[in-house]
Image (tube, grey):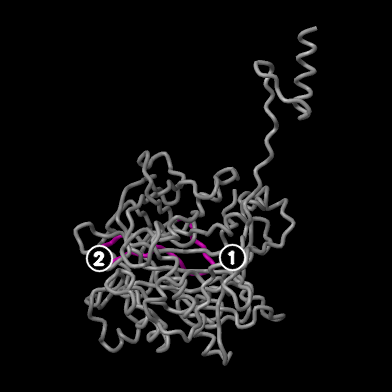
Amino acid sequence: MKSRFSSVITFLCVLGLLAPVPGGPQVKKPTAPVAAPPINPPVTNCNTTKPDAPIDPSLLTSGLPCTVTAIAPFDLDNLQHAFDFNSWLSFLALNSPASGGTIGADAPAIWENWAEVEDVFLPNGKPPRPWGSPPIRPAICPKGSTMPILRMVGKTPNVLSTVIQPFNTGPLIDQGGQYVHYEIVMNKPMFEYIVQNHLYSQAGQNKFSGPTEFPQGSIVQNTTNGTIGAIVIKAAWKVLDPKAQTSGFHTARVLVYIPPQENPKIQEKCYVATVGLVGLHIVHRTEIEPQWVWGTFEHVDNDPTQADVSAGQAHRQYNFFNPSCKNCVVNHQPPRPWNPNIVPFPGGYHSQIVRLTDMTDEVKKLNAAFQGILGNSPWKNYMLISTQWPTDGTSKTDPNGVPAPTFLGNTTMETYIQGTVPQSSSSCMACHGNATDTTGRPSNFTYVLERAQ
């Protein structure tokens, strides 16, 4: 009888009609499921600085643009300036210290705390850990380390073993014979879109009804209210000689991870290195630019232009060019096999890279102005190459949005496909317009969904 009475009390407690009796049977009320965070939450601090604003130190704290701000006249040259100005504002904001404060000293940048693609697309299609979780370390790496981890020796996965590529690709070897290492990270709106739509796995992509539409940056007219939208960062890092001067680079102390491969045979390895940033893509999807905005930066000492070389003006020390080497083949992949565990590269080889398309005079002036407000910080040693953007984001004849400029390449990431040859030379939007997920469905100008397992 006592047992039966206790069961009734328990039943009423579960229904919430009776509080538990002290000392009696305690029933844990069911907890409500935790609501998923908003994918693209509203913000109130969009940077709306107009592109005719003075380039002075106030821009260092102006914040991240939610979308591009343009002013009349809306001709091609004036709009290009607006997009390039926007790229620099984004550069200043995203390279500010993750710990807070103004861009300047060499410190981990905001974007370096974003989600790495390898921690989003996990083996066996497992769901990623929550935003802000530390990176997953391969078992071979030092235990307890909080350092970032670089896992790629090319902007595309499996670059060491893939023989047939849609474009020429391959590793980049610096003047010390070291491989350049790469990473791809995404901001929280993009991360949450992938997670909440289960696009991190092949099974989730199969169930997804689509189409894939990543969040867009937007702004409420005449306010600073808006949304940030999806942002992807692609970075190229050069391994630095610990005995050499490193003050000219933004640096990071990282784990370099080399995954095992069979063809060619590459042994798994993980080691600590100091690296310097040599290339940076900032890719931002906005309401007016659904094909994304593609701004690309490089270290000023990466390589000379072909015009500099032809005029005999390539005399200083470069990261990826040796002025003394008269017989080096220019812009050509290293000889195989490619094994990043063998450094320096056998035979004293190093890449001999030149920039085939020079920056415009307008971009050079813009770079000088922004570099001038960065004082003696390492960030003054970076330059915008250009920004590619859709001149007609709703074009009915060109799904790529009629890109301007037509071609754009970063010598650390599109090293071997520079130029102006259609279907052959680098164009961010033309290339990424072909991107699909693992089902073959268009993936909204990003290849990261192909990594789903």
Q: Dot 1 corresponds to which residue?
A: 229
Residue 240 horizontal side relative to residue 93, left or right? left
- Above or below: residue 52 compared with residue 427: below
- Above or below: residue 138 compared with residue 13: below
Magenta stretch encompasses residue 177: yes
Residue at the extreme left of the image, as rendered: 243
Q: Which residue lies at the image location 67% right of the left edge and 47% below the top edge?
A: 203
> Residue 180, how many percent across, how many down?
36, 61
The disc at residue 247 is: 2
What is the quadrant of the N terminus in the image? top right
Cα–Cα span, label 1 and label 2:
33 Å
**Magenta segment:** 161-178
Question: Which of the 4 image quarters holds residue 152?
Answer: bottom left
Circle nearer the N terminus (1, 2): 1
> Residue 407, how many percent across, how many down?
51, 80
- Of residue 235 and residue 146, the one placed in the foreground of this image is 146
Residue 442 horizontal side relative to residue 281, left or right? right
